[in-house]
Image: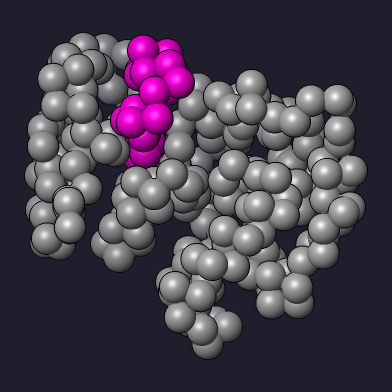
Amino acid sequence: MSKIRVALIEDHDLTRVSIRTALQQKGEIEVVGEAPNAAEGLKLLSLVHPDVAIVDIGLPDKDGIELTREIKSEAGNDETRTRVLILTLRDSKEAVLAAFAAGADSYCMKDVKYDNLLEAVRVTYNGNAWIDPAIARIVLQQAKTNPTKIDATTSEANAASEPSGGQTDEQMIDPYTLTERELEVLQLIVEGCSNAVIAERLYITVGTVKTHVRNILNKLCADDRTQAAVRALRSGLVG
């Protein structure tokens, strides 16, 4: 089994060492490079092409959000592009929405628990959005008050793949029926729970959760968990 290749772009030495040490405790993750600023970070990514880049939002030479935008812009539509996990102490609504608008795949607080950091890397590597529970509340609150804006920020990079014909999320969901179990899983997704937490709460295996999540994404025509949560809120599937 191939390892998840991770690059760290973080200016604080102690934080960088701590993250590297935590990640490397698991054999499934390999830290392939580190950089203390955005300029060196871009060079590093062009050389090692990691699966996931953990980017500090407060870099000394350039904001991590702007760096994320550059990373995504250079990658274009390449399916093997590096996915970006923003790491920050800032949980303001503006920072969160700006990060997703820039193309960030996941958003994690620096005080995240060790197991949650590993889960965030795994989820991001698998092509889904991992949002810190504290951050999820901000995103979903924005979804309720301004759904058009948040839907644009969380799916901007995938806009070209959206169905044509001006269908609304509600119209796209109407033809499908989620099972009772899928609705339970969807509710927990909206609350920001990881697959492991969902499995624990519903007394099912993580593998079963993944199957339910995949079915939910298909039925909601969503690209990732965040978009599924937004569409569920907009359509009234969950509250």
**What span is colored magenta in the figure?**
65-88
* 69 or 73, nearer to the observer: 73
Q: Is residue 182 left or right of residue 41?
A: right
Q: Is residue 94 left or right of residue 59?
A: right
Residue displayed at 75% across by 73% down: 179
Q: Is residue 56 left or right of residue 22?
A: right
Residue 6 seen in this snapshot: yes
- Picture coordinates of residue 239 (x, y %)? 80, 61
- Picture coordinates of residue 133 (x, y %)? 52, 57
Decide: is 79 above or below 137.
above
Residue displayed at 22% across by 33% down: 50
Residue 68 drawn in magenta = yes
- Picture coordinates of residue 184 (x, y %)? 69, 73
Decide: is 16 above or below 57.
below
Residue displayed at 77% across by 66% down: 178
Decide: is 139 above or below 166.
below
